[in-house]
Image (spheres, helix red, strand yellow):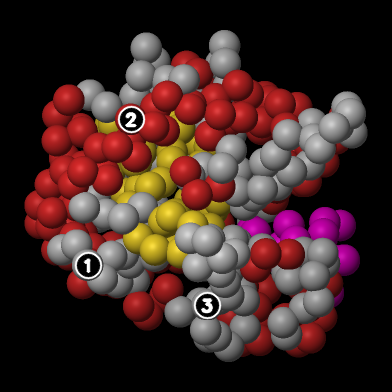
């Protein structure tokens, strides 16, 4: 049993922690900075309460172990629907009512919890009408298996149809200086319906934080210039830009950076406190032309 807080329209989480890459060490003792339990506990100790995983990530059992004894501090999110095939790039979506129930029961067992705080459909289905999926998820709410419903990798029309069946708490989509399509394809709909936008990959899978080759040299130079002037890192500035969208749009936006390092978790937490100057936000807007999405997660 848990009394874990669930955000409301008036008080969403400030930031979450994406756990897509959280893994046990491959033999031996993991480096202290990358021990998965240490990473999650560092986030919780720093005030991050929103943890996000998925059945697709193959780590729900690990996530369950990392929060054992601290479940009451966590708003726990997981996702269902995307299933790997025989090949590494072969996947399909299972969103029919029977799969909804089976996936939920399996996730509850792996996570070793009684209730999932926020349960996402991980990807839209071409085969199952979203109304059928959401009806099955609403029954999970009624039975106490989940507390709220979310959507990811869907269209604005999907969100409208789903929300007409049962209130949708959050829509999770890519949003960063490297991927801004959400501003025209999804944001107007979630603002209209009062649905929180969870912005995954706010560092562009590393290309905005210096761990991958930059997608745009102009964006990289501007981030570096602002970061140098403020005594922070380029990645922290990029994350602060996503944070700034909540105030600019007068709508809840929850950045969801992922990390497998205690050091990076703490840097990301610090980024949530940075307030960019209006002129720096304008500079970043101007150099970050809207681009197509980077790989989905």
Query: Residue 236 colored magenta?
Result: yes
Q: In this figure, which residue is indicated by the disc labeled 1? A: 127
Q: Is residue 180 left or right of residue 130?
A: right
The part of the image, by quadrant, that contains residue 182 is bottom left
Q: Position of residue 160 (x, y in %)?
A: 17, 65
Q: In this figure, which residue is indicated by the disc labeled 2? A: 105
Q: What range of the chain is rendered magenta?
A: 225-240
Q: Is residue 90 left or right of residue 275?
A: left
Q: Is residue 20 left or right of residue 219?
A: left
**Cα–Cα span, label 3 and label 2:** 32 Å
Single out the mark in the foreground, 3 or 1.
1
Q: Residue at x 42, y 20 (%)?
A: 113
Q: Residue furthest front?
A: 86
Q: In this figure, which residue is indicated by the disc labeled 3? A: 293
Determine if residue 76 is in view: yes
**Cα–Cα span, label 3 and label 1:** 23 Å
Circle 3/circle 2 CB separation < 8 Å: no
Q: Residue at x 48, y 27 (%)?
A: 110
Which element carries disc 3, helix, strand or loop?
A: loop
Mark with earlier residue (3, 2):
2
């Amino acid at each position: 049993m848990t009394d874990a807080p669930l955000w409301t329209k008036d008080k969403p989480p400030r930031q979450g922690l994406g756990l897509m890459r959280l893994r046990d060490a491959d033999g031996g003792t993991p480096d202290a900075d990358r021990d998965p339990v240490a990473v999650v506990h560092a986030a919780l100790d720093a005030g991050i309460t929103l943890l996000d995983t998925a059945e697709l990530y193959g780590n729900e059992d690990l996530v369950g172990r990392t929060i054992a004894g601290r479940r009451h501090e966590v708003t726990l999110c997981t996702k269902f629907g995307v299933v790997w095939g025989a090949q590494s790039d072969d996947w399909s979506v299972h969103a029919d009512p029977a799969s909804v129930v089976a996936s939920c029961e399996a996730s509850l067992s792996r996570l070793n919890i009684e209730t999932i705080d926020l349960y996402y459909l991980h990807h839209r289905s071409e085969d199952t009408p979203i109304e059928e999926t959401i009806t099955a998820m609403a029954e999970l709410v009624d039975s106490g298996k989940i507390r709220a419903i979310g959507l990811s990798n869907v269209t604005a029309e999907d969100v409208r149809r789903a929300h007409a069946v049962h209130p949708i708490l959050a829509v999770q989509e890519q949003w960063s200086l490297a991927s801004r399509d959400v501003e025209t394809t999804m944001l107007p709909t979630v603002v209209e319906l009062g649905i929180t936008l969870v912005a995954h990959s706010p560092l562009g899978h590393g290309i905005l934080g210096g761990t991958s080759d930059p997608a745009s040299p102009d964006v990289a130079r501007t981030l570096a210039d602002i970061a140098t002037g403020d005594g922070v890192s380029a990645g922290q500035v990029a994350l602060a830009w996503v944070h700034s969208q909540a105030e600019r749009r007068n709508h809840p936006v929850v950045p969801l950076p992922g990390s497998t390092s205690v050091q990076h978790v703490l840097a990301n937490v610090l980024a949530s406190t940075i307030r960019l100057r209006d002129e720096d936000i304008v500079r970043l807007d101007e150099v970050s032309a809207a681009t197509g999405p980077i790989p989905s997660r």
